[in-house]
Structure formats: structure tokens, C-alpha cells
Image (tube, rainbow, N blue to C red):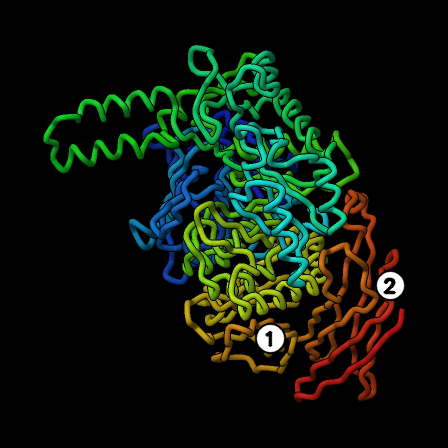
Amino acid sequence: MPFSNTLSYTDSVHCFRSGQPFNTEAVVATTDRTGPGQPVSFSVEERDNALILSRELKPADQVFGMGQSMGGLNKRGRRFSTWCSDDPSHTPEKESLYGSHPFLIVDGEDTFGLFIDYPGEMFFDIGYTQPDLLEIRIPSLDVDLYEFTANDKKAIVRDFRKLIGKPYVPPRWGFGYQQCRWSYPDAQRIDEIVAGFRDNDIPCDTVYMDIDYMVDFKDFSIDEHKFPRFESWVQDKRAQGIRLIPIIDAGVRIEEGYDVYEEGLEKGYFCKDEQGELFRAAVWPGLCAFPDFLKPETRQWWGHQYKTLTDLGIEGFWNDMNEPALFYSPAGLSKAIDTVSAARDKNIGIYEFFGLKDSILNMANSREDYRSFYHEPEPGVRVNHEQVHNLYGTNMTRAAYEGFEQIDPDKRFLMFSRASSVGAHRYGGIWFGDNHSWWEHLKLNMQILPGANFCGFLYSGSDIGGFGANASAELVVRWTQLGVFSPLMRNHAAMGTRDQEPFAFDSHSMSIMREHIKLRYRMIPYLYSEYMKAVDTGDALFYPLAFEYDDDRSRKVEDQLLVGSSLMNAPVYEQNARGRYVFLPEDMLLWKVRHHDATDAQILKKGDHFLELPLEEMPVFIRKGCMLPLTEATSWVDERQPEILEVLVNLDQGACYELIYDDGISQDWQKGIYDSLLLAVNRVDGELIATAEVTRGQVPWSTINFKIYQQNGSVVEKSVLL
């Protein structure tokens, strides 16, 4: 079909517009260049008031992306839908999770990328129905399609990221270890948790406050009986190196005298039903009103509410239940009650019983309820929620971000969200929702990271140990080892499950987690530096091996990731495994990190290896010609600034690394203000020369100790004073 408008952003990025799409504001790049008339990588047809995109999949084609979604790194052979879903049971058949990220890359003889800018539900069949066919159904004629035709997968990621804007940057303390639980009931329990970390010498930077801190689960309220003298208590925790992070939910309790509800109602900030009356549905507080975050005035009002808590010393938040989650509506509850009542005193059969059960279970997050309320993004314009469902969580996080800009424009606040869509990465990070303490979800955590990164969500991660169900010590240990590499490193568990803090387990397991969390703190200079480079360049932090190496073997690897420019990660993700097979696409330095901080490093040759990895050991792989800078572990990120930087080097002909550093809390990075340390090792006339040069600003380290591993197995140590 012909497109009403086609634009070119670069020679390899083109937009094809059909109809009059809703402006999601996902794309921030601008252009006035006329583009080609039709896409070249896929065909488009109009069918039953929908657009159908299709493309033949050749036998060797692989499909990457789809953001936060089920499945492996290669998404071929699956179906997906884009619908931000409050569904904690992430079982293999699920087609949507909490985020809607319709960006994919088809990699084969003809490599291309595709982003569909549409805020409602779409359906992706990636070789599921027909193994040789990619088919996408968009139930609308109003949509923007973006085609990326660079023949290099990394270039496609960069082109996409340039289109949608730079990611959110957290404060550096947001790279520290974080502890959360739904059911820390009061300040006394949180004090005990903090003492557990400090008394057991386990680093930690934040402890979270779930819905328990509120009065009757009302946003921006504090229960003074359970959390007395809140402001001074927050200050006391900061003195111990702990920042407290409260949850903020989307639903606002309907209650006379509750100022947030009454002001929102008076000023028309809440979503309305078809008759123009207040839309009501239940979440934690019971019946709630839902802010219309698509309306700019609502976002400004909501963003200002965070000041209630920032004025008391709070420096970070997590937005939750913002798909939005709906437990039930009055209409849905009445219908379910009628169904149950009609079944009383009847001899119902199996199918009637199934219907009875479904009448209760299907009350939550009912599509009928989502279709029953509206947004007013601008005066005189009404949009049904179902058409823009995936934008709700994004605009809640945007409201917070814009509020922080007003509260303290030069300060970075911690912010991440459960629900998201493309564009939300500019306002905060995401965590991957309410997972379970299942080994399958440990592996899924690893496999989600690249797709989320491609869409700009660099600050992301899963709940370490799993949120639902009971975690074994072994599972939490192995998950912690994976979490060491993830920017958001948060352990989180649900009410009713066993305690999941590192010190809640046996002393041996705790000691392993202690040392690996300390390793995380030692690695923060590298992780933070790579994060800031990825913000600037548009790269991902996590890539499948196939994005860097062209060999067929690398294309088959589903359980290893590149982490920044220097590292590869290959976690153990199976119960009772005391080793695993690893494929090395090049010679790599394997550093086995053991508990009690013992180290064992050696050069391994390219190829397949079986590694013995007892529970105490986690592998860190350093690529050829690359470096890993490490600092001293501290009890919290800004406890003190160590003066010594240790650098592990996998020497090829030479090796170099640029370490980026800044103050970690201000917005100066947006002005191009940062520090740079250039590290290098070269062989000159048969002698190894190590150098460290401050090329920009100043850095806090005064001594750089290089530990250089050569291909012949020898190890050379060099020190440089700055």
C-alpha cells in the first residue's frame, strides 16, 4: 500500500507513515528529508483494517531484539504481542511481559532492523506458524514504521538509539548492591536489615520500602506509627551509607480528605469513563483513581508530588503497578458475584465450573475494563485507553523525571519502573518485573538484557533470587554471580516467601555472596565507565556473541554475553551444576573469582571448554587486548575513594582502555564534563611499558597497578604513579 509520507533520517534509516499515528514521542530525532516510497526489507499490505508486514525467513536468518520478552537471544520460532501485562507467571508460552518494545533485527544474508511506533497491541509471528515467515499484524492503519538497512547489527542498534534519544543516567551509587522485599513492615525491621549487612561485612547501598510504609497504601503518605520520626531516620540511614527507596504505585486511593485524591479530582487529572465520570478500579488500597499521565498538566502535578518525600531526604524511587494493574472494577466484581450466585445450589458440570472459576480469575486486568476508560492528551481530544495502553507506565515515569528536574535540576535521582515502552529509557531504568525463584528465570534474566539494552534500557536487571516462590541458597548465589554484571543489582522477594538477604542463608553461602558482592563494588569503575560510553555512542552494554564475531559457532551461543568492550559473561544457571561448557570466540583470560577473594587467572585458547566451577567460583572473561580496571571494595559506593586502581590485562600485541569517571551525582555529564584516564600496555623493544595518563579533568586514583597476562602464560606486574 502507498504511504502518506516517507522520511529519511540517514541513508540507512527511513520512516514510512500510514494514516495519522498517535504521537507516542518515542522518537526524538528530526528530519525533513524525503525518503523512499516503500520499504525494501519487508512487504506491507492492508487487510481487514489492519496492516500486515511480512518477510521470508531464510534458514540461516536469526531474529534479535523485542526488548523485554520471553525466549532466548534468538527470537525465531516464537509469537509475541505488545501489551504491558501485569502477569508474574513468566512461563515459556507467555507472549508479553511488562514492557512493550517492538524493535527487532533480522540477521542473515540481508540484515535489517524494524521499529513499529504504535502504542497499542500488535502481534508478531516470528516463524511460529510458518517456519519460513515473519509476519506482524498491526490492528490499525495509523502507524509509523522505521526501517534500518545498515548491514551491521551494531550499527542498526546505534541508528535506533540515535533515533530515540540518550538513556537515563542514574547516580553512581545506583550501581551498588540493593536489597528489597515486599514486607519490611516497619522501620525497626529495616534497621535490622541494615545491621545484617554492616555486621556481616556485606556491601550495600540501598534498602527499599514497599507498600508497607504508606498509610492505607496511599501514595506519598508515611505511616508515622510504623516509621516514626521519618526525616531523622532517613538521615540516620544515610549516615550508615544506606539510601532508602520507596515504591510509588499508579492507583490513587479514593478517600475523602486524602489531599492527592481530592486535588486530582478537583483539577480533572484522573482518567474518566465513557460518560465522563471518574474511572474507578481497585489496586492495593481498594478502589482507586488513575492519573491521566498522557495529559501534560497531570504529569506536572504528579511529578511535584515526589517533593513530599525528597524534602525528607529521599533520593530515589521505584514506580510500580503502572501497566496499570487493575485488580477489579466495580462492574467486573458485580458480574463475577452474579456468576457465583447463579451457581449456588446447582449441580454444575466441568465446563460450568471452568466458567465459574474464570469469572473470578479474569477480573484482574480485564480487557473490558481497559476499554472502559479514556485519556485526554490535549483539550478536546479523547483517546480510549486500549489504543494507548503501552504508554501509561512510560508517562508515569516521565512525570517523575520531569518532577525531579523541577525539584533539583542538577541532581540525579534513582528511578526505575515496571511498565515501559520505547522512549521510557530517557526517564528511568526498568526492572524485569515479578519473576520467580526458578532456575529458568535466572537464564531468562541473562537473555532479556541485550534486547532491553537495544531499546535504550541500560539501567536494568531482574530481581536477584526471584521475587515469587522460595529460593534456595544455591540459586541466590548463582543469581548474585550474574547480577554482578548488571547495572541494576537488586535482590527482591515477595511477602510469604523465605527471607532472601545474603545473611538469611547458611554461613557458607553468605560468605560466597559477600565476596561476589565485593567483586561487584571492585568492578564499578569498569561498569560505570562502560555505561557512560554506551550512553554516548548508542551501543548496548550487553551483546550476544553474534554481534561481535562472524563465525557460525558464535551465532549458536544462547547463554553467554559480551559485557562492555572488555568482558564476556558465561554464568552457571543450572541447579547442582558445578561447571559448564563455554565457547571462546578468541583467546581469553579466564579469572575465576573465589570466595575469600582468592583468584585464579589463566589464558584459555579459542574454542570449546568445559570449566569446573564449584559454587564458590564465578568466571570473569577478559577479551584479548583488553583490560579490566578494579578498585578496592567499600561498604557502600561513596564511603570513601580508594587511591589504588588494579588493572587486569589480557595482553595481545598491546592493550589499552579509556576509563571514564565523573562526580556520579550531578548532571554535568550532559554538558560534556567528565574525567578520562587512558591506560595502556605496549611492548617496546621487547620490554613491556605500562602507562596511565589523565587525558581529561582529574581522577581520584594515585597508583595504578597493572597485572599483565601474556599469551605465553607469564604474568608481569607494573605500577604507575599519577
Q: Amino acid at mark 2?
A: Val
Is 550 on the left or on the right of 637, as rendered? left
Q: Which callout, 1 or 2, points at the residue further toward the start of the chain?
A: 1
Q: Nearer the viewer, mark 1 or mark 2?
A: 1
Q: Position of residue 53 (x, y in %)?
A: 40, 41
Q: Amino acid at mark 1?
A: Arg
> Would residue 164 be visible to someone looking at this image?
no
Query: Circle 2 sits on which residue?
Result: 694
Residue at image location 34% in from the left, 49% down from the top: 93
Q: Image quadrant for the N terminus?
A: top left
Is 104 on the left or on the right of 150, as rendered? left
Is 670 on the left or on the right of 167, as rendered? right
Q: Position of residue 558 (x, y in %)?
A: 45, 64
Task: Kindly indicate whether the residue at mark 2 contacts the one at mark 1 (C-beta within 8 angstroms).
Answer: no
| The one of 718 and 39 positioned closer to us in this rendering | 718
Query: Circle 1 sits on which residue?
Result: 594
Residue at image location 82% in from the left, 77% down from the top: 690
Q: Image quadrant for the C terminus?
A: bottom right
**Which element carries disc 2, helix, strand or loop?**
strand
> Would residue 683 be visible to someone looking at this image?
yes
Residue at image location 56% in from the left, 67% down from the top: 569
Q: How many marks?
A: 2
Neighbours of disc 2 within 10 Å: few (<14), some (14-19), many (20+): some
Is 90 on the left or on the right of 158, as rendered? left
| The one of 234 and 107 positioned closer to us in this rendering | 234
Residue projecting furthest to the left:
347
Neighbours of disc 1 within 10 Å: few (<14), some (14-19), many (20+): many
